[in-house]
Image (cartoon, rainbow, N blue to C red):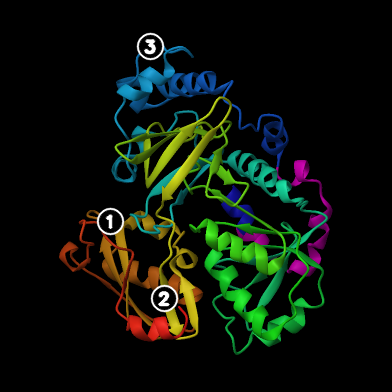
Amino acid sequence: MLNLLKKIYDGLPKEHLKFLRYIPDRVLFGKSYWGWQQKISFEKNNLDESLANTLLYVRQHTMYGKEKLPTNIHAGNAKEILETLPKISSQDLATNLAYYTSDEFNTFNSYLTTTGGSGRNPTTILLSNELFGIEWAHVHHIWSSVGYDRRKHLKLTLRGKSVKGDKLMEYNPVYNELVVDTFKVKRSNFPKLLQVLKRYDITYIHGYPSLVKEYIEYYREFGGMPNLRGVLLASEGISPEEKHIIAEFFGCRVVSFYGQTERALLAVDLKGAGEYRVYTSYGYPRVVDGELLITSFVNRALPLVNYAIGDGAVVREEKDHIYLLNLTSRWGKDFIFLDKDKKIPTAAINLHSMIQDEILFYQIHQYEFGEIEIRVLQKPGSRITAEELLKIFGKEMRKNLREFSVELRCVPDEEIIKSSRGKKMLLVQNLDQGILGASGH
C-alpha cells in the first residue's frame, strides 16, 4: 500500500500538493509516529524488558524463533539467551526470508523492499507499514537537536535523486524540501541552479557527506551560500574532522546518524566527535569478534536477532547510555566519475527496485570518465531470463545516470573481483588515481 501511495504521489504535479507542508506531523506520518514519540529513548532502564519482549515475539511468531529460542524468556535472562543464539546474515535472509518473518504480517500491513547493496549483497527484506511513522519519529527527534521543524524550515536535499525533464531541482511538499538532481548538477551549471535557490529561504541542508562537501566547493567559488541553522548528514560514513570542516564553513552545527535499510539500529553523533549514542527504543547492539550484531525492536514484520549488518564497531556502555565508537562501515566512500570535476557517490546509485530479488550481486567497473560497466550475478533459479533482467536493471540505472554510458552483462562468479580479504567489491575503480588526485578528488 505504501509503495502504491508513493507511486501515485510521484505522478501528481507538486504545485497542487503544497498544502501537505502544513499538515501536522502526527497526521502526515500516521498513528505510529504519534505513538512512538512518547517511546523514543536513549536510556538503558527499559532495555532488558525490550529485549525480552522482542525475543518472546520472535519465539511466538517466526519459524526461526520456534526452532532456536527457549520458552522461558524474561528480562533477567534475555541478554544471556542472546549470547547463545547464532548470528543472522544478509545471505541467510536472501536464501530463506520466510524463515525469519512474522506470521502476523502480509501484503496489507507490510511490504517487500531491498537493501541498496552499498558494499554488500543486495537483499530482499520485509518492512511493516508502521515503520514509516516510527522511523520518522526518530529522525525528527535527531534533527530537533539542531532546531529543525519540518513545517517551519525549508531544507535543501542533496541525495541520490533524479528530477524529471531538464529541471535541476524540484520542491517536495511532504518533507518541505528542495530536492536537487545531484546527477545533473556540476560546476558548469551550478550558477543556473544557484539563481533558483536564491529565491528561497533555505535553513538546513540534508544530504550525503560527499555531496555536501562538493557543494561547499561550489559555494566557495560562486557564493550565494544560504544562512543555515544546521546540516543533516545521512547514508555515508564521515570522520569528525570532516564534520568540523562542514560546520566551520556553514557556521552551524552538523548532526549525523547511523542507520540501515533493515531498520536494525539507530544511533546519532550529537557532538560531531564520532561517538554515536544508541536509541535503545530502536535496537540493541553488541560486538562479537569485532563484528557488530544487532537485535531490532521496531520492525515486527522481520524481527532481526543477532543480525550481522556487515560493520565493525566498539560498543561502550555507560551507566545510562550506549555508544558506538570506531565505526568501520559499509557506508560508501567510493565514487564514479563523469569527468575529473564531477563525481557520483556509489551510495547515490543504489538499486531499490524489486529486480534485486533476481540478483545475487552486482559490481560496477569504471575504465573511462562518463562510462561504467555493471557485472551482474543472477540468482540461480531466477524467474526471468538474463536478457529481461539486464533490460529492467539497465533501464533503472540509465534513468539515474543519464549522462553516463552504462553497459551491463550477466557474468559467472569468477568475473566478480574480490578484495585481498576475499570480499566482493561494489566498485572496481580503474581510472588513473594520479589524475583524480590532481583534480582534488
Q: In this view, does 343 lie to the left or right of 200?
A: left
Task: Estimate the x, y position of residue 130 in percent, counting from the top left.
Answer: 61, 38
Task: Locate the C terminus by quadrant.
Answer: bottom left
Counting from the top left corner in percent of width and height, residue 47 is at 54, 23
- Report the amino acid beneath label 2: Ile
Depth order, front residue of 437/152: 437
Q: Mark 3 points at which residue?
A: 71
Q: Around disc 2, counting alpha carbons within 10 Å, would you say few (fewer than 14), some (14 to 19), or many (20 or more)? A: many
Q: Horizontal placement of 2 versus 100: left or right?
A: right
Q: Is residue 71 visible?
A: yes
Q: Earlier in the sequence, mark 1 or mark 2?
A: 2
- Residue 369's place in the image compared with 417, above or below, is below
Q: Where is residue 163 in the image (x, y as percent from the top left)?
A: 62, 74
**407 to 137, vertically: above or below:** below
Q: What stretch is highlighted in magenta?
A: 7-29
Q: Residue furthest bottom?
A: 188
Q: Residue furthest left?
A: 414
The disc label shown at residue 336, or none: 2
Asked if residue 20 lies in the magenta stretch, the reply is yes
Q: Give the number of the mark in front: 3 or 1.
A: 3
| Separation of marks 1 and 2 at Cα, in angstroms | 29 Å
Q: Foreground mark, 1 or 2?
A: 2
Q: Name the main secondary structure of what is drawn in magenta.
A: helix
